[in-house]
Image (cartoon, rainbow, N blue to C red):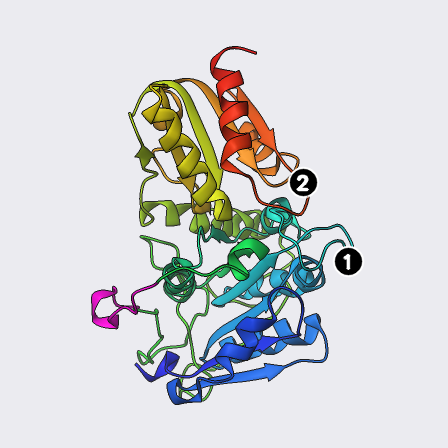
């Protein structure tokens, strides 16, 4: 439909995310409009305005910019508008290492907003699959009326990989819940009972006049509400709506035997190194498998079952253990060991093999 043939991309140049703005600026042939904002806050606020007006809206940044966008992300959550926020992670904190890689923003993506402010978090694994996860981020945002944070990192952004240009006919259809006038007063927070998604009412559509904003909304009617019970209800609905997205994302796949001595866990841009290390260890006869996460919040529905089949679990990250902390919060019955590196550099297969062997040997 015409509703998302026009897309708006707002960004402030920031390493290592600037190339996204540069590349999208070339695609006017696809109806893409790009806008270089004066700062990160203007970038996301104009994106939210574009989404309210009916565009597929995207804003891109790196870690410091994500921090500046956090208040407006809360506005997108409260108004329940579709929005994709791409965070190309770099070394931090502060200005940190602008040209180096780090998986530094996971906890910020999950929790770095005021109030109970749930949204979907996805991570790409390689240069080649960035398109797939960008597509899925857009599909989820549009169909479930929610902001989605897509995490990549400097290693992926500066890397290259052969990629077969896909045929869009091979991708699933995107079906946003566009509101239509039904002859009665429009209720902006009336929801689909299956997935709790509200309809997307495009300004200018006769009969769909409505108001949204950052103040709490009365359930169904969308009027401003300070009713205590209503606030608790709406907070719960927004959380449950995002959790229900677990029903449509793929289950986590185990590379190697589905049970054994050690399960190596990774997420995002560490995939290539972890897969190579695990493959080498398997060829040497070790009982090792890999589970790599691209869907972070919500996690795949079979996650607990996968964890239960291994004697030891080791989480490998280019940070001090952010995903490991998150997993402990949600799966406290398991012990998560860690392999971490925070040097602005990716893992090497040699160092991963050495440390995994030490874990296998109980050292």
Q: Secondary structure at mark 1?
A: loop
Query: Which residue range is magenta in the image?
Result: 163-174
3D distance between C-alphas at marks 1 and 2: 15 Å
Q: Is residue 339 left or right of residue 186?
A: right
Residue 275 image offset from top left, x and y in percent? 40, 38
In this view, the residue in front, 121 or 81, is 121
At 38% from the left and 40% from the top, the residue drawn is 300
Residue 99 image offset from top left, x and y in percent? 67, 59
Q: How dense is the environment of label 1, judged by Cα within 10 Å: few (below 14), some, or many (20 and up)?
A: few
In this view, the residue in front, 41 or 144, is 41
CB atoms at circles 1 and 2 under 8 Å apart? Answer: no
From this viewpoint, is residue 304 visible?
Answer: no
Which residue, given by chain and number where applicable, does mark 2 sit on? Answer: 342
Residue 310 image offset from top left, x and y in percent? 38, 19
What main secondary structure does the magenta stretch of the protein show?
loop
At 61% from the left and 38% from the top, the residue drawn is 322
Which residue, given by chain and number where applicable, does mark 1 sit on? Answer: 95
């Amino acid at each position: 439909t015409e509703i998302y043939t026009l897309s708006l991309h707002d960004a402030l140049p920031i390493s290592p995310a600037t190339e996204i703005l540069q590349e999208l600026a070339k695609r006017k042939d696809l109806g893409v409009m790009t806008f270089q904002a004066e700062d990160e806050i203007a970038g996301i606020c104009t994106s939210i305005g574009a989404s309210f007006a009916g565009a597929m809206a995207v804003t891109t940044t790196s870690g410091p910019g994500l921090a500046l966008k956090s208040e407006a992300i809360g506005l997108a959550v409260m108004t329940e508008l579709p929005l994709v926020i791409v965070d190309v992670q770099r070394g931090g904190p502060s200005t940190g290492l602008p040209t180096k890689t780090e998986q530094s923003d996971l906890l910020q993506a999950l929790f770095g907003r005021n109030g109970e402010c749930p949204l979907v978090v996805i991570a790409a694994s390689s240069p080649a699959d960035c398109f797939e996860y960008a597509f899925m981020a857009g599909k989820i945002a549009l169909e479930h009326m929610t902001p989605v944070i897509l995490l990549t990192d400097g290693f992926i952004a500066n890397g290259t990989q052969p990629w077969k240009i896909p045929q869009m006919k091979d991708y699933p259809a995107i079906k946003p819940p566009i509101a239509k006038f039904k002859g009665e007063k429009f209720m902006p927070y009336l929801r689909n009972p299956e997935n709790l998604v509200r309809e997307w009412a495009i300004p200018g559509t006769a009969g769909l006049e409505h108001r949204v904003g950052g103040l709490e909304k009365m359930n169904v009617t969308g009027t401003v509400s300070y009713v205590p019970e209503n606030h608790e209800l709406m907070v719960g609905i927004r959380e449950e709506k995002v959790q229900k997205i677990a029903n449509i994302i793929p289950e986590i796949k185990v590379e190697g035997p589905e049970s054994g001595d050690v399960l190596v866990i990774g997420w995002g841009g560490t995939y290539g190194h972890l897969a190579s290390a695990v493959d080498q260890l398997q060829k040497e006869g070790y009982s090792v498998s890999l589970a790599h996460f691209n869907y972070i919040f919500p996690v795949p529905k079979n996650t607990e079952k996968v964890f239960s089949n291994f004697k030891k679990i080791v989480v490998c990250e280019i940070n001090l253990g952010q995903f490991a902390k998150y997993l402990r919060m949600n799966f406290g019955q398991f012990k998560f060991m860690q392999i971490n590196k925070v040097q602005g550099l990716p893992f090497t297969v040699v160092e991963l093999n050495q440390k995994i062997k030490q874990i296998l040997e109980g050292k």
